Image (cartoon, grey):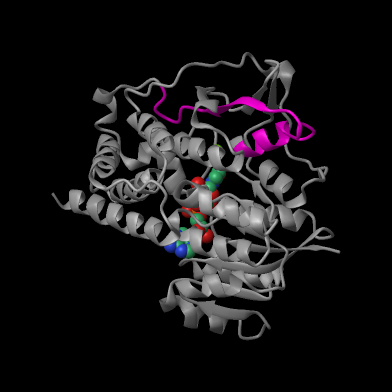
Amino acid sequence: MKKRIAIFGSTGSIGTQALDVIASNPDKFEVEILTAHSNDKLLVQQAKKFNPNAVVIVNESKYAAVKEALASTDVKVFAGENALEEVAVFDTYDMMVAAIVGFAGLKSTLKAIESGKAIALANKETLVVAGDIVMQRAVEKRVPVIPVDSEHSAIFQCLIGETRNKIEKVVLTASGGPFLGKKPNFLVNVKKEHALQHPNWNMGAKISVDSATLMNKGLEMIEARWLFNLHPEQIQVIVHPQSIIHSMVQFEDGSIKAQMGLPDMKLPIQYALAFPVRIPNAFPRYDFSRSSSLHFEQPDIKTFRNLALAGEALHKGGNMPCVLNAANEIAVYGFLRNRIGFLDMMEMVERAMEKIPYIEKPSLEEYFESDAEARNFAASLIHI
Ligand code: NAD
Ligand code: MG
């Protein structure tokens, strides 16, 4: 029996790599659903190649183009934001690859969980915003949430066979991004072109900027908290510029397990799709004979304040991670459109966290409200 896969966000960096993995393993996987925001041409191309049951184009102005291009096929075409939730509950697929970027991925992922689908989770913002509710529903529905994020995939892999053993702490590795070692006098002038040049990974625009500000690692601390049911004190971040060790788990006897490999997202994607099986592949291997050394250093949280702010949100809990995430999404949006500078992004997040009222145990509706409030507040700062 082939595993039937729905890729939400199929036209993105993770989505296209997930399709590469599926294309290499046609005996194991088939594509049931593909969704895209606006890239109708790529969505159509993917639909013609993989022949899914349904596609969604979120941007309704592209509906006619997609419908026409797929007229000679039996692919069902849906459009609009609500269609994501409609197709997420289809009973024709087994696993959702949650690869939409940002808060926009939350609702459809929750729907998939509620209808009993396994989740391969790339969309970390889903757990940052409402991790308590998402993981609780997954437990209630007995739905596996398998991380795609490389650090969390590493931790997940280190935990195999350790169900009875307590975690003392996890160590998330960070490449440090393109501005490792830089100080504010340099960062004040950097533009999106520089921020989008990541040394080790080729990713979507938003996560690339998040990696440059270290917000990505901050979001990942919160993601780890929910995925592995950790206390904030159990999560440490260390800079490891080579990105060979993808993360580590330290157990109660002091022993540390690490998962290693070349930085290539196809590996954690394939692992999540095929779990618990490892599929042989021809991806390049890490070669110890050609490597010099692996290096570690402390993150500079004074310069890259986003990491400290995320740590604060993690410790405070409640709606603070949601507020942090929403303000950051607006900040990154503003930066990518050259409306604000690099350091302004961190300023906006900090001010939103000061401004939006704290809620200790928000309902899902309250998370949505906090998200909207923080977005509006952050957007108002861009106009100043
Ligand atoms: P991307 O920008 O390359 O792709 C995003 C996808 O989501 C596209 O298919 C796009 O059409 C869709 N999308 C965007 N906005 C949408 C909206 N409002 N509604 C519906 N669909 C929308 O992003 P990416 O780099 O592939 O990242 C996707 C997610 O995976 C992010 O949460 C990111 O943090 C996470 N992630 C990515 C990587 C990576 O290497 N790219 C690694 C780890 C985690
Ligand atoms: Mg990561």
The image quarter in which residue 76 lies: bottom right
How many marks the image carries: the answer is: 0
Residue 33 counted in the magenta span: no
| In the displayed structure image, the side of residue 27 where residue 211 appears, left or right | left
Q: Nearer the viewer, residue 36 or 256?
A: 256
Q: Residue at x 51, y 70 (%)?
A: 40
Q: Nearer the viewer, residue 203 or 154?
A: 154
- Above or below: residue 116 compared with residue 87: above
Which stretch is magenta? 152-180
Residue 154 counted in the magenta span: yes
Residue 328 in the image: state x and y as whole percent. 35, 45
Does the rendering let one see residue 28? yes
- Above or below: residue 265 compared with residue 36: above
Residue 353 in the image: state x and y as whole percent. 29, 42
- Residue farthest toward the front in the current orientation of the protein: 361
The image quarter in which residue 296 lies: top right
- Above or below: residue 19 compared with residue 85: above
| In the displayed structure image, the side of residue 264 where residue 236 appears, left or right | left
Q: Residue at x 77, y 50 (%)?
A: 274
Residue 125 in the image: state x and y as whole percent. 47, 49
